[in-house]
Image: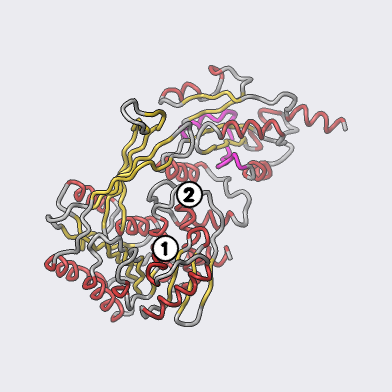
Amino acid sequence: MSTDLINLVHRLGRPRVLVVGDLMLDRYVWGDAARISQEAPVILLHADRREERLGGASSVATMLQALGADVVLAGVLGTDGDAARVRQILADLAIDGDAVLADAARPTTVKERYIGRAQHKHPQQMLRVDYENRAPLTDAIERELIERILPAIRGADVVLISDYDKGVCTPAVLAATISAAKARGVRVLADPTRGGDYGKYRGCSTITPNRLEAGLAVGRELNTPADALTAADELCTRLDLEAGIVTLDRDGMALAGRDGSRGVYPTRPRHVYDITGAGDMVLSVLGLAVAAGASYADAIRLANVAGGLEVEKVGVATVSRDEILRDLGATDRPVAKFMSLSDLLDSLEIRRRAGQRVAFTNGCFDVLHAGHVQYLQEARAQADLLVVGLNSDASVRGLKGPDRPVNPLDARAVVLAALQAVDYVTPFDEATPIELIEAIRPDVLVKGADYAKPDVVGAPFVESYGGRVHLAELRNGFSTTTLLQRMRAA
């Protein structure tokens, strides 16, 4: 399976995608949730960072841009400062916003999330505050939006509709979009709103409601994947779709096609940190894959992978083709965590944007033993993820002598990568990891308690920007040298 999907990623090309829907600004306020307020029984968030990202249909556009598509966005903003911020982000990302209208009568939709950390654990969403007007577009704005959408369809390879029920995806806007796209042979994929009249999606190529949305659309609860498959079939027939798709969170997706194709496509288990944006990611990847000529079944399999990567991040975040390829490779290669410094820095940038803190340690880890495992578990407990700098074979020889290492670099990397406590492994050739530390800039630098803090390589550098040094407890009676001596004696 992985090989087929890897080939699909490589042939995605650079399609032109028109995204129509409700534009939003997602604002995140990050901080430490360390105590209870004295004024009321509520958590006090000590804010230390504020971030803004595009949400809704503009989130779909952002995800597509990160996945290598040329994106045209159509929708409506207010005339406020939040609208200016959205337009600036679109310009920075080179997303075509010529079909984004300004409506002075409505505010720009903003979702403001407060994200708290506690005791160095993974950050969690504490509260969301919405600023919005969900009234349908006025007739004048509706007509102007349609006039902007129709020319954009002529150059599009696929059209995606992202309906968050904020008033932009009116029946008239969708009817004009679907009709014009069908006339040019361009597929239309829609992520529908919850409840309401699904008749406005009639004639789309496919729609992608989740379990709850599809249940509301067909008037019954969908308790099993088989129920979802029946609902997908019903929606396909009722709305004249090429295929009905129902997303099922950890159960994957159910597909029922007009051509008789049917199936439930599971996804593999993930560490789910935040489901925000998962539906947007599924729509984005389905659209890209369909534009590349993939079947709905293969498009779903690829979207399952991308959606899984999305839920491992906090908030609405992007996923790159390289991340998807690495994840596909991870099903076959146990050293998927083992990467070059440049790839590592790219991955850490994404994790840090999600508010995660980085711990770093290093070593030869030649013959792994219980002392190493305990040490790495303690190192991982200091932050949200652990990077291990692994001495290359030449570096080990320089430190330990010509008889070491016993196990070559690749073998040591496989063993380390198999440990749950280890998130990333990266090699270095030097005698000390100072260059790695300076490049990674860890939040926590971990070394064994047999070191004094002033003797830890990189300690002054890490503390210079507010990081800390942690000396981990060592387990008595375990050392690689002693273990090798006992083995040789035996």
Determine the residue positioned at 36% across, 62% down: 69
Magenta stretch contains residue 138:
no
Q: First in sequence: mark 1 or mark 2?
A: 1
Query: For the residues carrying marks 1 and 2, which lies nearer the camera in this image?
Result: 1
- Residue annotated with mark 1: 212
- Taking the image as shown, residue 296 lies to the left or right of residue 177, namely right
Q: Nearer the viewer, residue 191 or 130?
A: 130
Q: Over which residues does the magenta segment extend?
A: 420-442
Determine the residue positioned at 48% across, 25% down: 468
**Image quadrant containing the C terminus:** top right
Scheme of image coloration: secondary structure
Which mark identifies residue 312?
A: 2
The quarter holding residue 150 reads bottom left
Give coordinates of residue 456: x percent, y percent: 55, 22
Give coordinates of residue 428: x percent, y percent: 57, 36
Element type at mark 2: loop
Q: CA distance from mark 1 to mark 2?
A: 22 Å
Magenta stretch contains residue 433:
yes
Are dots 1 and 2 in contact, CB under 8 Å? no
Q: Is residue 438 visible?
A: no
Q: Which amino acid type corresponds to the residue marked 2 in the rendered image?
A: Glu
